[in-house]
Image (cartoon, grey):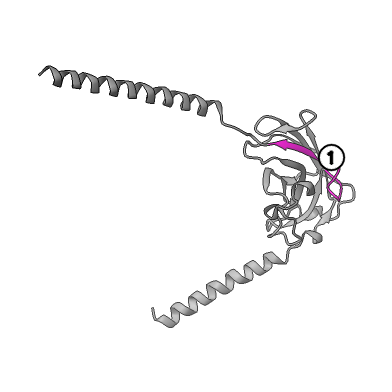
Amino acid sequence: MSIYKIILASFLICLVIQLSHGATKERLFSDLEKGALEVTAKPSRQGVLDAGIDKLSITWKLSSTAKKQANFTTIKVKLCYAPVSQVDRPWRKTENELFKDKTCPHKIITRAYNKSSQSFKYTLERDIPTGTYFVRAYAVDAKDHEVAFGQSTNEAKTTNVFSVQAISGRHKSLDIASICFSVFSVLALLVFFVNEKRKAKLEQSK
C-alpha cells in the first residue's frame, strides 16, 4: 500500500470519528423531555447514609404528561450529585451538553422500558464519595440516546436529597493483616538476634 493510500485511509477514519463525535455534541440536556418519568428515592433510614451499607428504595413510572414514550426502549437510573456537592468540584460539574455533563456518574440500574411502575432496592456502592445526592432516570431510545428524564428532586435539585458518608479508615481485614505482619516481623527479628548470639558464642568457644 502506497503512502498516499495510508494517508487517505487515516483521513477518512479521522473524519468518521469527528462526525460521530460531532453528532454526540449536539445532544443537549435542555432538549430532553422533562418530567416524563416520576421518580422517587426513599432512604432505608433517616440521617446521613453509609456507603456500602445503607439502601435506597427507588421507584419510577411513566408520567401522565409524557409525550415521547413511543421512543422509549430503556430506562437508565443513576445517582446524581446535588448542587451543594458540586461547588468547587469541576469533575462533578453540570453541563448542558450531555457528553460533558458530570452530574450523574454513578450507575444504579438499566432496565427495559415498561410503562407500569417499576422498583429497585439499591445498596449504596462502597466507592460512593461523601456528598449530597438525588436519583435521576433517563428514558433512552433504540439508538441509546437520552430522550427524556425524571428525577427524585425538584428542578433546582434542593428537595428530597440525601447525604452519604463515604467509607473512611481501614477495613478490619487490613488491620488484621497489618497486625499479623507486625508480629511476624518482631518474631523474625528475635530469631535473627538469637541466631547471631548463638553464632557468636560458638565462635568464642572455638
Q: Residue at x 19, y 22 (%)?
A: 200
Q: Residue at x 15, y 18 (%)?
A: 202
Does 187 appear in magenta? no
Q: Residue furthest right?
A: 65
Q: Residue furthest front?
A: 204
Q: Quadrant of the C terminus?
A: top left
x, y percent for residue 45: 78, 28
> What is the chief secondary structure element of the magenta stretch?
loop
Give 64 or 4, whichever is nearer the viewer: 4
x, y percent for residue 82: 78, 46
Question: In the visual, does 201 lie left or right of 95?
Answer: left
Q: Which residue is mark 1?
A: 160
x, y percent for residue 158: 85, 45
Question: In the visual, does 90 lie left or right of 205?
Answer: right
Q: Residue at x 38, y 26 (%)?
A: 185
Q: How many marks?
A: 1
Does 160 appear in magenta? yes
Q: Quadrant of the N terminus?
A: bottom left
- The 10 Å Cα crowd at callout 1, few under 14, some 14 to 19, many 20 or more, is some
Give 30 or 38, whichever is nearer the viewer: 30
x, y percent for residue 194: 27, 19
- Which of the 4 quarters of the picture holds residue 91? bottom right
Q: Which residues are magenta?
A: 153-165
Give 74 or 157, whichever is nearer the viewer: 157
Question: Compared with residue 180, is residue 112 higher up or lower down, i.e. above or below?
Answer: below
Looking at the rendered structure, the secondary structure element under dot 1 is loop
Give 142 or 146, whichever is nearer the viewer: 146
Q: Residue at x 67, y 29 (%)?
A: 53
Q: Amino acid at mark 1?
A: Asn
Question: In the visual, does 89 lie left or right of 200?
Answer: right
- Which of the 4 quarters of the picture holds residue 120? top right
